[in-house]
Amino acid sequence: MLMTASINGIASTSISREGENILFNKYIPVSYRTQILAKVITGVLWGIVGMLIMCAVAAFLFDFPGSLVAVISVVSLPGILFANLVGVFIDLLNPKLHWSDEQRAVKQNLNLLFSLVICVLFTGLSIWILVKFHFTINQAAISLISFYALLDIVLYGVLMKKGSALFSKIEY
């Protein structure tokens, strides 16, 4: 699910898609922090939609029991948040604001690729650890939730601390 959340590109292009309208965002009476959180939340909500669709398809095609689908759904939530926090942070570091149409803001934006690479690395690391140490399903679920929740807390703190400063330095 981490991959699904990073592939959609909503968070990792959220600043870039503002384009020349970024100046409007700098002067509206809404804090940078609130605007950043709105971008993360939007990405998370769409990530959850993707996760629910994938779980429904997996349950139908592979006849997964409802309990497994529920575990997958719960375990996926911190990963989805992680992917979106990473995506927004990367886009704040390097927004692509000059484009002629919104498709170019997304399709020609390497921030999506950077976010995807980070998420692929963390997915690979997670899988490697789970396989290497022969985790049971319960151990895997608890470990993944704990690991990504801890990462989410750290990334949230960094994003809230550095994000507003990065946002204020963005110029068109």
Image (cartoon, rainbow, N blue to C red):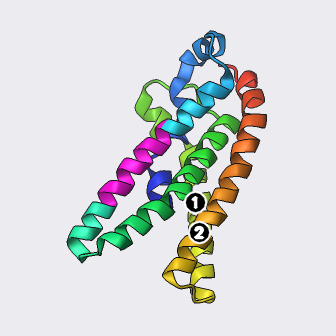
Residue lying at 25% horizontally and 76% vertically, measured from the top left: 62
Q: Is residue 53 magenta?
A: yes
Residue 50's spot in the image, x, y percent?
Answer: 36, 52
The kind of secondary structure element at disc 2 is helix
Pointer 2 local density, CA inside 10 Å: few below 14, some 14–19, many at least 20: some
Looking at the picture, how far across and down is residue 69, in whole percent? 35, 68
Residue 7 position in % (x across, y down): 46, 53
Instruction: Identify the amino acid type marked 2.
Output: Leu
Task: Say which residue appears at 63% left-offset and 73% top-offset.
Answer: 125
In the image, which residues are magenta? 42-54
Q: Is residue 158 above or below residue 146?
A: above
**Which residue in the structure is indicated by mark 1?**
119
Which residue carries the number 2 mark?
144
The answer to whether one can see residue 1 in this image is: no
Q: Quadrant of the C terminus?
A: top right
Q: Amino acid at mark 1?
A: Cys
Is residue 48 on the magenta stretch?
yes
Q: Determine whether the residue tagged by mark 1 lies in a helix, strand or loop.
A: helix
Instruction: Name which of mark 2 and mark 1 comes first in the sequence.
Output: 1
166 or 104, which lies in front? 166
Q: Is residue 4 left or right of residue 95?
A: left
Q: Residue at x 50, y 59 (%)?
A: 2
